[in-house]
Image (tube, rainbow, N blue to C red):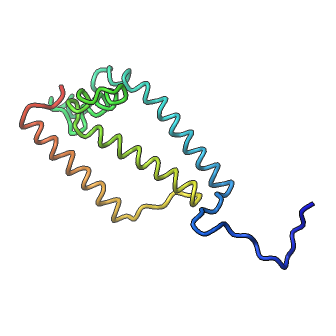
Amino acid sequence: MNEVRVDEPMALPPAGEPAAASPTARRLWWGWGAVGMLGALAALAVRWIAAAPPTCAMRTLLGVPCPGCGTTRALAALMEGHLAEALALHPLAPLLALEGLVLWCAAGWWLWRRGRLPSPRPRTLEVAVVVHAAVYLALWLGRLASGTLPW
């Protein structure tokens, strides 16, 4: 039987090796993985959703597709491996999918290592939103001028 002696120092993990994750961190990490799996299953339904008639309010009211029009159909094409079709529907769809995957993996890493998600700095979040909006708007204006918006 192993006895724990109070006068002996606790063994620490060797330098360079990560400490074992707490049970809470492991549960959160597995939960985050389950969310990813549910997202992947929902993504299988994307083609069915993309086949439905467009419900864009801007397109319905003004007759002009919005900056995000075509993104759902582009992601559906990407899920089926049709990169050319995805790029034609919305050129930012592959970058958006990659960004989502990277953020999901980073969040899983944080949950595993720290047991919680970091809170984003408000300024960083503002900059990210403004940059995304500016890129979407610039692309939309370019596609509107060239007549390459998906209808």
* Quadrant in the picture for residue 73: top left
**Residue at the extreme right of the image, as rendered:** 1
Residue 50 lies, with reference to residue 14, above or below; the image says: above
Q: Is residue 65 left or right of residue 122?
A: left
Q: Is residue 141 left or right of residue 30?
A: left
Task: Please provide percent x and percent y for residue 97.
Answer: 35, 40
* Quadrant in the picture for residue 47: top left
Task: Please provide percent x and percent y for residue 96.
Answer: 32, 42
Near-viewer residue (89 or 78): 78
* Quadrant in the picture for residue 75: top left
Q: Is residue 13 left or right of residue 101?
A: right
Q: Residue at x 18, y 32 (%)?
A: 65
Q: Is residue 111 left or right of residue 11?
A: left
**Residue at the extreme bottom of the image, as rendered:** 7
Q: Residue at x 65, y 59 (%)?
A: 20
Near-viewer residue (148 or 97): 97
Residue 12 lies, with reference to residue 72, above or below; the image says: below
Q: Residue at x 89, y 63 (%)?
A: 2
Check the picture and name the quadrant holding the N terminus.
Answer: bottom right
Near-viewer residue (118 or 83): 83
Q: Residue at x 10, y 36 (%)?
A: 144
Task: Please provide percent x and percent y for residue 55.
Answer: 29, 27
